[in-house]
Image (spheres, rainbow, N blue to C red):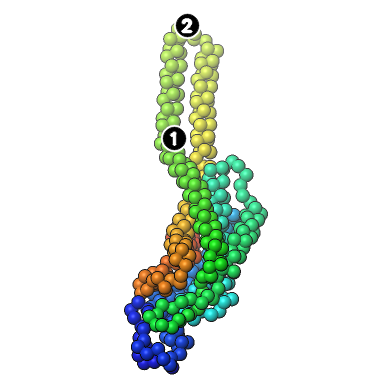
Amino acid sequence: MVNESLTTTAAGALTVNDTSGFDKTAVVQRLNDEMAHLMIPATVYISVLMVLGLVGNCMVCYYYGFKTRRTTNSFFIVVLALYDITVCAFCMPTEIADIELFYTFENNVACKILRFVNYLAGIGSILTLIAIATDRFKKICKVTAPQMTMKTAKVIGSVVFGAALLLSWPSLIIYGSIKVNIPTDLDIELKGSDCTSTKDRQYRKYVWAFNIVHFVMFFACSIVLIVLYSIIGKTIYQHQKGMRQYGSGNKTASSSNETSFSTSSARDDSKLEDNHDSNRNTNGQTSDKATESKSQKANREISRKSTVKSKDKCKTIDSETIKLTIIMIVVTVVFIVSFLPYLSLTVWRVYKGKHEAEFLSGGGLVGFKIGSRSFLLNNTLNPWIYGIFNSNFRRFFFGWLHCKRSP
């Protein structure tokens, strides 16, 4: 039975004039309910991401898996979408439960699986993005080199999943339903349960090592992606510039060839006129005509070969390849930006060595809960990026919506 003199400060600290005869469990539950109310913005944020992510990623899997030509690019996009669906279908509902049960999350198994799947999907996604960037690099910068095959892409997908498993399994040990201190102004100690990393000092070095490894891996992968797409971007720019030059150069070459032929013809005509009196026989006239005919054919052949060569050079990168590359560049940028707040806040919390409610309150605590789940934004935005930049997918998606609305 909670004493009627029990109050809670704006900072979330519990105060009471008379600490006798109250139930700790009831107090913890009351504090948890107040925190759940405070965290409504975070709950709404994740709920919206979950709905949009599930609908969008399911459409991506169906469209790129069954409605388009099977390519390495479509295969990797489906792999990314499957990682995103896993997060949207399992991790986001569990994240909502973790927020709502701020001090009363006691399901240790669900917590471990939640963190493990989050790490698995995150690592799998960034390694898949590197595979996509490599495929784009070969298709644009190494056009004449052997290209990635579907068999190779499937092998890479399996290797990526294995690497993600290897780098994620320590989270099953580090994370769990951990007893955390509830900030109060009482003389008694109140503890709740939260899904977070262990605070035991004996595991502190392992928690640090785990987070440092993932932090370094994230930045290393980001650098690789930035370098690859910088080279790709430069190649596309040079290609577009070459196409513009080809367009104007083709007209110049045509004009030059016409001028060259006219000059040659004039020179031949002058020669014929000068020799008109001394060479009137039929054999001489036939020889001059043959010379003129050969000169004309030679100029035309040179012009044709030059045109074909220029066309071949400019058509090595088609517009569809460029469009897909731009889509994947945007997806990569969104991934990097969405993971930065999460990684930064995670390292900060490990450095503090306390539960976030012990050093944050109010709006700051809400911001921390949203920021520490910023990576969820990546799982939701990918299908909408495809929709913005891929007109075929956009038409397919809105066509599907129209069919669903029709009676």
Q: Amino acid at mark 2?
A: Ser
Image location (x, y in percent) of residue 151: 66, 54
Secondary structure state at the residue bearing disc 2: loop
Residue lying at the far front in this picture: please name it. 187
Quadrant placement of the N terminus: bottom left
Pick the front one: 365 or 128: 365
Pick the front one: 78 or 192: 192
Pick the front one: 210 or 311: 210
Going by the image, does 9 lie left or right of 81? left
- List the residue tagged with mark 1: 250
For image coordinates 55% across by 12% down, the residue present is 283
Image location (x, y in percent) of residue 62: 56, 66
**Any part of residue 115 in sight:** no
Image location (x, y in percent) of residue 231: 49, 44
Pick the front one: 51 or 210: 210
Q: Circle 2: is it few (<14), some (14-19), or many (20+) Cα within 10 Å? A: few
Secondary structure state at the residue bearing disc 1: helix
Residue 368, quarter of the rendered image: bottom left
- List the residue tagged with mark 2: 278
